[in-house]
Amino acid sequence: MLRLFVVALAICFGTDLEELGVDDECGTTGSCSLTALQLRSRKLRDELYQDVEVSGNRSESKVTFIFTFGAVATSKEPLEDLSQPSRSFTGLRCYTEAIDNSFFPRRTDAGSDLNLLMHPKVATLALHLGKDSEFYPGEGRPELPRHGTEAIRLPDVDLHDMKHYFIRLENLQLDGEDVSHMPLFESAHKFANLAWGAYEKQTHWQTKQILRMEDLILKNLKGWRLVAQEHLSCIASGSSSRSSGSGR
């Protein structure tokens, strides 16, 4: 089965895209860009497949899964998967934390703690090193880490480095047990390679070897292949990258 690791949220036909003319941030009405895109996709899908003969070959437009690593919060209200009864996305949102002492604030990946917005509804994993991580299944904890009340948190830029994600995922423990082999967490470790390789090239922190996206896919995602990758300059963050690929 063909799966895209850069997931297409929907395919739009026609020029009447008023649903997409809203702000990127969700308001109290819930009409944000992702919600609008899902609604528009559903509307166009229904129009496209009114023909009885064609409707037998119809396919649903949906997000297959989401895996993020220190992702920035994006909306005033948590984004939802409108194709699911639970309204929660499949996948895992990860962010790293360092707990040096219970009397001191937690240090948290600065990317995930960058603004006052909310994260999407998806299972959430706060990755700790050498101790139990914190896992929230189902819709996760869209308010963490910025709006969490369990502890004081301070953003840490160094914890955004992907090496901290690889190390923590490889040694992941919950309730004192090694759970790194569980399918959801194994998948997160595999897709972390795609997040890391999305930039033009990376230097491995241990071997110092220069790695590109195609190298990471060949080694860690058997049967997958890189279809396209574009590296762009971005004033805000210094750089950005767009990749697409497929696998069986």
Image (tube, rainbow, N blue to C red):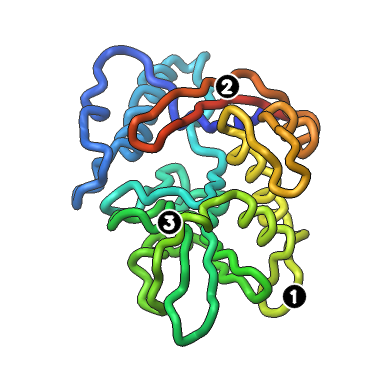
Three-letter amino acid code at disc 1?
Answer: Glu
Of the two numbered discs 3 and 1 on the same chain, state the one appearing first in sequence: 3
- Residue 34 vs residue 206: left or right? left
Q: Which mark is residue 110?
A: 3
Q: Which mark is residue 235?
A: none
Say which residue label 2 marks: 229
Nearer the observer: mark 3 or 1; the answer is 3
Determine the CA span between mark 3 and mark 1: 28 Å
- Residue 63 position in % (x across, y down): 50, 38
Three-letter amino acid code at disc 2?
Answer: Gln
Q: Residue at x 69, y 47 (%)?
A: 205
User: Along the line of sight, which residue is nearer the eye, 170 or 63?
Assistant: 170
Outermost residue to the front: 208
Q: Which quadrant: the C terminus?
A: top right
- Residue 61 vs residue 1: left or right? left
- Around disc 2, counting alpha carbons within 10 Å, would you say few (fewer than 14), some (14 to 19), or many (20 or more)? some
Residue 10 appears in which quarter of the rendering? Answer: top left
Determine the CA span between mark 2 and mark 3: 26 Å
Say which residue label 1 marks: 177
Three-letter amino acid code at disc 3?
Answer: Ala
- Around disc 1, counting alpha carbons within 10 Å, would you say few (fewer than 14), some (14 to 19), or many (20 or more)? few
